[in-house]
């Protein structure tokens, strides 16, 4: 009885695992066929991404510690750079690692695929979780049967079983079998140590039946995985439908990132000019610049109330930048080089001019550190008004 029950559970468990593997394989083939028939330009790379996704699905069902949301995110993160460069903008050159990482990050920030990834996460997560619990429950049943099948009975149980089977033999009654009541009493005595398992075993069987009956709709792995290709197709169509708006948004973000390094160097050269004005004014007045002197009034906002945003905005207008259109790489490199060399030359001149001044070198270095610390990775779209200055706080420094 036990051997047959154990064998049935083992065969059933293996058949269910095999059936799930067949479902995963069919779902993978359906998804690959969708890409091949509708988006042939994406197939070489899309096949790899789809294969990795369904491999993770199989591993999750078998008990691997994989997060379903991460699986879905990785699938769409990998697909979007290919869709953007080969489907939406087929004229673009082959994407590099940096561009791919940028597009992967933009995919989540801009919700490129709409709510389809979240929908897939919900359906796949619920269906796979139920399937995984079902397989774990079957394995638990096999373990319980194995445990009870190898129980060691006591000597009293052995004597009772011997008396039940062979006492009639001693009396010459070879064909007489023990009565049913006697058999029950003997078996209850032998199984007293494990009889309490019966209650929980019955509850286990009922729970397993309820779990199987509840595996339908979004909790049905077969229904969800075999229809996954259709949801992915709808997600790609959503991207194509909003392709123009999406491309414009991505180009604007790219323009901001391309423009930012130039603005940083522009802010640095603007500050170095302020330092030179201050040093030359100091030398001209013999190092006696008071807080109300003309040179101090000229430089106080640049030196003490300086803001990298206001400086960058000033340089922006001086360079006649009126929009955030993309700048050619050659222009960016040229501007970076000119501004960078100008800043270094001005900084060296300031350091040389302040060598003999009280706190001069320290003042220049401190202000340059203020420039570096103040620069944040954001685009200076406007120039805020200079902050108010407490002259009493800085009076001793300039007298």
Image (tube, helix red, strand yellow):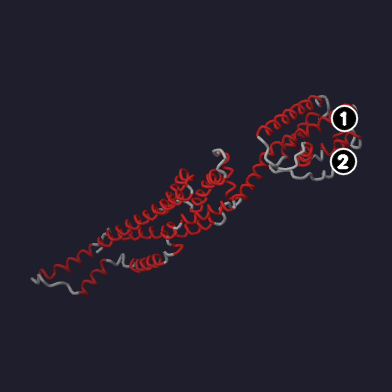
Rendered image: mark on residue 296 = none
Q: Residue at x 32, y 57 (%)?
A: 15
Q: Which residue is mark 1?
A: 281
Q: Residue at x 74, y 45 (%)?
A: 381
Quadrant assignment, res 367: top right
Q: Secondary structure at mark 1?
A: helix
Q: Nearer the viewer, residue 373 or 34?
A: 34
Quadrant assignment, res 358: top right
| Relative side of 56 to 286, left or right | left
Q: Residue 97 in the image: x percent, y percent?
A: 55, 39
* Label 1 environment density (alpha carbons within 10 Å; few <14, some 14–19, many ≥20): some
Q: Which residue is mark 2?
A: 391
Q: Secondary structure at mark 2?
A: helix
Q: Residue 3 in the image: x percent, y percent?
A: 25, 60
* Count of numbered marks: 2
Q: Nearer the viewer, residue 27 or 214?
A: 27
Where 228 falls versus 397 (above or below)?
below
């Amino acid at each position: 009885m036990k051997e047959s029950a154990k064998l049935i559970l083992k065969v059933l468990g293996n058949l269910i695992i095999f059936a799930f593997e067949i479902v995963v394989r069919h779902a993978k083939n359906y998804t690959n066929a969708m890409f091949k028939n509708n988006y042939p330009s994406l197939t070489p790379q899309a096949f790899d991404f789809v294969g990795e996704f369904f491999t993770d699905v199989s591993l999750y069902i078998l008990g691997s510690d994989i997060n379903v949301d991460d699986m879905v995110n990785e699938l769409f993160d990998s697909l979007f750079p290919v869709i953007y460069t080969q489907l939406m903008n087929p004229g673009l050159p082959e994407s590099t690692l940096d561009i791919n990482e940028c597009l992967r990050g933009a995919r989540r920030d801009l919700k490129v695929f709409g709510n389809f990834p979240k929908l897939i996460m919900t359906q796949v997560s619920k269906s796979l979780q139920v399937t995984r619990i079902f397989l774990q429950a079957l394995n638990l049943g096999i373990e319980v049967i194995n445990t009870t099948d190898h129980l060691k009975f006591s000597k009293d149980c052995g004597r009772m079983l011997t008396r039940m089977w062979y006492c009639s033999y001693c009396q010459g009654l070879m064909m007489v079998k023990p009565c049913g009541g006697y058999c029950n009493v003997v078996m209850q005595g032998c199984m007293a140590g494990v009889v309490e398992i019966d209650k929980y075993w019955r509850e286990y069987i009922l729970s397993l039946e309820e779990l199987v009956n509840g595996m339908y709709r979004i909790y049905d792995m077969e229904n969800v995985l075999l229809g996954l290709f259709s949801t992915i197709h709808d997600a790609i169509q959503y991207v194509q439908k909003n392709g123009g708006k999406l491309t414009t948004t991505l180009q604007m973000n790219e323009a901001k990132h391309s423009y930012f390094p130039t603005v940083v160097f522009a802010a640095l050269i603007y500050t170095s000019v302020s330092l030179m004005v201050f040093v030359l004014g100091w030398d001209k007045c013999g190092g006696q610049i008071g807080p109300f002197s003309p040179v101090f009034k000229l430089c106080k906002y640049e030196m003490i109330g300086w803001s990298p945003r206001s400086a960058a905005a000033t340089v922006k207008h001086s360079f006649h930048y009126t929009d955030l259109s993309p700048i050619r790489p050659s222009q960016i490199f040229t501007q970076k080089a000119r501004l960078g060399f100008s800043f270094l030359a001005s900084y060296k001149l300031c350091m040389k001019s302040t060598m003999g001044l009280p706190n001069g070198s320290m003042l220049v270095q401190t202000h340059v550190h203020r420039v570096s610390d103040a620069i944040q990775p954001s685009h200076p779209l406007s120039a805020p008004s200079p902050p108010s200055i407490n002259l009493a706080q800085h009076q001793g420094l300039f007298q």
